[in-house]
Amino acid sequence: MEDEGTNARADESFATNLFACRASPSFFPSGQRWAKAESKAFRPMTSDMVASLTNELTVGDVERDPAWIDDSTILVTSNVGKAIMTASTARRFAMRYNRFRFRWKRPLRREPLSKVLRLVYDEDANPELFGYFVAGAPARVLDNMNGNVGWGVANGSSCKYLSLAWGDEDMRRQVEALIQCARQIKEDVVDLP
């Protein structure tokens, strides 16, 4: 049986954190120079606010709900960390929902010798050199170049992957053949050219 004092402290902590979050500014000053009113109104996030918004993920959390990642935002500190999480979550999502995972090699600035390509394009060693698509998987818009900013679709917006399309009919046929081959050999990964 839980201690009433513990529950009261938890409720008090929650109320404090909720108040701290509600007291956050309704705007965030932008640019290099802030007006006096902006500087006066701005309050940085406190460690209590961060603690109220973040939870450390445990093995038990994952075991209880394998789909936890579908609606979670995960903060990482490096592009390699992001690439590892992307590869792992794409793989798990495809397995959980029995969907193909499309994978492609990101282009390099300079093309290395063909003998070196196999070493460079090693998914375990260099996960950041690969891109992924799984139909229905959650994602984030990564730029403002899509022409939909006026519709509210901007950098950081949540979205779900819907489909892949090619303007080149030969490429479309080639991908369809790769999908058919993957079905025949019961492979869940389709490596795009």
Image: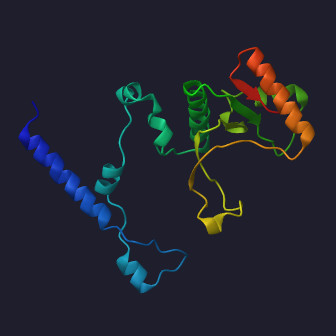
The residue shown at (62%, 65%) is 151
Q: Nearer the viewer, residue 184 or 101?
A: 184
- Eyeballing the image, is 15 above or below 167? below
User: Quarter of the image holding residue 145?
Assistant: bottom right
Residue 12 vs residue 24: left or right? Answer: left
Q: Position of residue 28 (x, y in %)?
A: 45, 71
* Residue 63 shows in this picture: yes
Q: Residue 110 at what x, y percent from top left?
A: 85, 43
Q: Does residue 112 appear anywhere in the picture?
A: no
Relative to 63, residue 192 above or below: below
**Where in the figure is residue 1, as x and y percent of width and height?**
9, 30
Judge whether 93 appears above or below 44 on screen.
above
Give the mark count: 0
Residue sitting nearer the eye, 120 or 72: 72
Name the residue: 88% across, 33% down: 173
The residue shown at (77%, 40%) is: 106
Residue placed furthest toward the bottom = 36
